Amino acid sequence: MTEVSSTPVPAPSAKALLKTLQQEFKVIGEHLPLAIGVDKQLMASRPEINRKQLRAALGMHTHSIRYLKTMQSSSQRFNLDGTPAGEVSEEQRTLASKDLFERFKKRAQEHKTEQAAKDKAEKEAQTERERAEKLNQLMSKFSRK
């Protein structure tokens, strides 16, 4: 007797879903500012999509550096089919600019901290090498021959 598997098919990850959406919809692939409520448009066109994963995928997309850069310089939002869907407000452009500034500032600070730790480790290693060299010189000078 053949048994039918009742194991649900695992849903794709949010990242995989985002890649699919970027290939399927030009406005997502080109990181154009999306219309408010684009998640409802996506659910209407693709009802099989898991709502939680869609929200996660759209969150990753709209918080990406490329999307934010486009948002700060755009004046128009777009529907999934590429038609205009309203304007990007000055407040939204400012928010995108502020978010990018904070990200780059944080990245620069992390880089600075990493560099300082690396420099400190190199300095300690150099000091240890010099100490070992001096000890070897003293040992050779005072050792019995």
Image: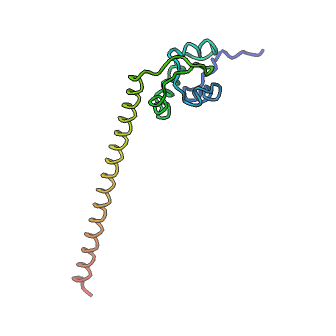
Q: Is residue 128 left or right of residue 66?
A: left
Residue ID at (51%, 14%):
37
Q: Residue at x 51, y 19 (%)?
A: 55
- Taking the view exactly as shown, the residue that stands out farthest to the right is 1
Q: How is the image coloured?
A: rainbow
Between residue 61 and residue 54, name the one nearer to us: 61
- Compared with 113, 54 (above or below) is above
Q: Residue at x 64, y 14 (%)?
A: 45
Query: Within the image, what quadrant is residue 131 found in?
Result: bottom left
Q: Residue 18: give x, y in percent of width and height.
A: 57, 27
Which quadrant of the rendered structure holds the C terminus? Answer: bottom left
Residue 118, percent from left and from top = 34, 54
**Which residue is at the far bottom?**
145
State the image coordinates of residue 143 (x, y, percent, origin top left).
Answer: 24, 82
- 97 left or right, relative to 40: left
| Rendered view: 143 above or below 58 | below
Quadrant location of the N terminus?
A: top right
Please say if 16 is above or below 104.
above
* Count of marks placed on residues: 0
The residue shown at (32%, 48%) is 112
Q: Nearer the viewer, residue 133 or 43?
A: 43
The quadrant where residue 119 appears:
bottom left
Residue 65 x %, y %: 46, 34
The vertical placement of 36 against 111, above or below, is above
Residues 93 and 4: in front is 93
Q: Quadrant of residue 144?
A: bottom left
